[in-house]
Image: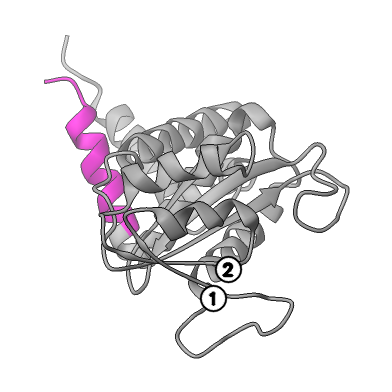
């Protein structure tokens, strides 16, 4: 029996439209309503896209040059200074190459024993690492990296010594995630990697091309 080409073309058109809405930052609910499909179908498709993005983002080479590092907290209702009011929040550690890409990792705590192994695996030795004054970063002073720090309580920017780049990423990520009105903790990793991917590839045209390419590569032959 010949394939129903009309049905196939309709499905392909729906998929392409969903891809465009995903790249535009729409929620699955909004995309489903606009495209005219079941909400769960769109939600599942978006979940698969985020899983694919996360897999690709983990295929990363270590960063080299000038690297900014910082940790941030996502979710939860309580607010507070670093190390306080973090109940219910997800801790995330970020590394950003100046003028380049960012890498993120969910962490259990912000202790030196947690952060240093990540930096050692994701930063090339002899790179310059910029951090704030969190005591956990003191370990960098006797590491294979050159370490420069900025004390935010005294001055936010000290000429070339700052972490504005990674702070900018945190702001962008949180702004994007707010539109989802709460993300389950078990799904947060996928949304985090989506934010990382969007930051590393700011052009919507490139994002769409990457998604289509990755989907094609994963299709059975």
What residue is rendered at 34% in x and 34% in y?
55
Task: Please say if the residues under marks 1 and 2 sit with CB atoms less than 8 Å apart.
Answer: yes
Q: Which residues are magenta?
A: 207-221
What residue is rendered at 51% in x and 44% in y?
115
What residue is rendered at 54% in x and 36% in y?
189
Picture coordinates of residue 182, whole percent (x, y): 74, 42
Q: Seen from this angle, which residue lies furthest front?
A: 142
Q: Quadrant of residue 89?
A: top right
* Residue denoted by label 1: 164
The answer, for residue 179, to whether it is visible in the render is: no
Magenta span includes 111: no
| Neighbour tally class for label 1: few under 14, some 14-19, many 20 plus, Cα within 10 Å | few
If the image is split into quadrants, where does the N terminus sit?
top left
Q: In this view of the protein, which residue sits in the foreground, 39 or 164?
A: 164
Picture coordinates of residue 177, whole percent (x, y): 64, 52
Q: In this view of the protein, which residue sits in the foreground, 76 or 179?
A: 76
Task: State the predominant SS element of the stretch in magenta.
Answer: helix
Picture coordinates of residue 73, whole percent (x, y): 69, 50
On the rendered structure, is 116 left or right of 90? left
Disc sitting over residue 98 in the figure: none
Disc sitting over residue 167 in the figure: 2
Element type where label 1 sits in the image: helix
Q: Seen from this angle, which residue lies furthest left?
A: 221
């Amino acid at each position: 029996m010949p394939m129903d080409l009309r049905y196939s073309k309709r499905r392909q058109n729906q998929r392409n439209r969903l891809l465009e809405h995903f790249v535009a930052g729409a929620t699955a609910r909004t995309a489903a309503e606009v495209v005219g499909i079941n909400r769960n179908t769109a939600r599942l498709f978006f979940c698969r896209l985020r899983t694919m993005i996360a897999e690709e983002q983990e295929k990363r080479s270590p960063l080299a040059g000038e690297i900014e590092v910082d940790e941030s907290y996502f979710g939860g209702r309580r607010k507070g200074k670093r190390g306080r009011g973090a109940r219910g929040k997800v801790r995330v550690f970020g590394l950003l190459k100046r003028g380049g890409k960012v890498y993120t990792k969910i962490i259990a705590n912000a202790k030196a024993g947690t952060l240093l192994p990540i930096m050692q695996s994701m930063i090339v030795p002899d790179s310059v690492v910029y951090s704030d004054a969190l005591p956990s970063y003191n370990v960098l002073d006797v590491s294979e990296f050159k370490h420069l720090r900025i004390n935010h309580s005294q001055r936010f920017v000290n000429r070339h010594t700052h972490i504005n780049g990674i702070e900018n990423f945190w702001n962008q990520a949180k702004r994007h995630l707010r539109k989802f009105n709460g993300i389950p903790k078990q799904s947060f990793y996928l949304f985090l990697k989506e934010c990382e991917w969007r930051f590393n590839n700011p052009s919507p045209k490139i994002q769409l091309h990457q998604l289509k390419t990755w989907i094609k590569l994963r299709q059975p032959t």
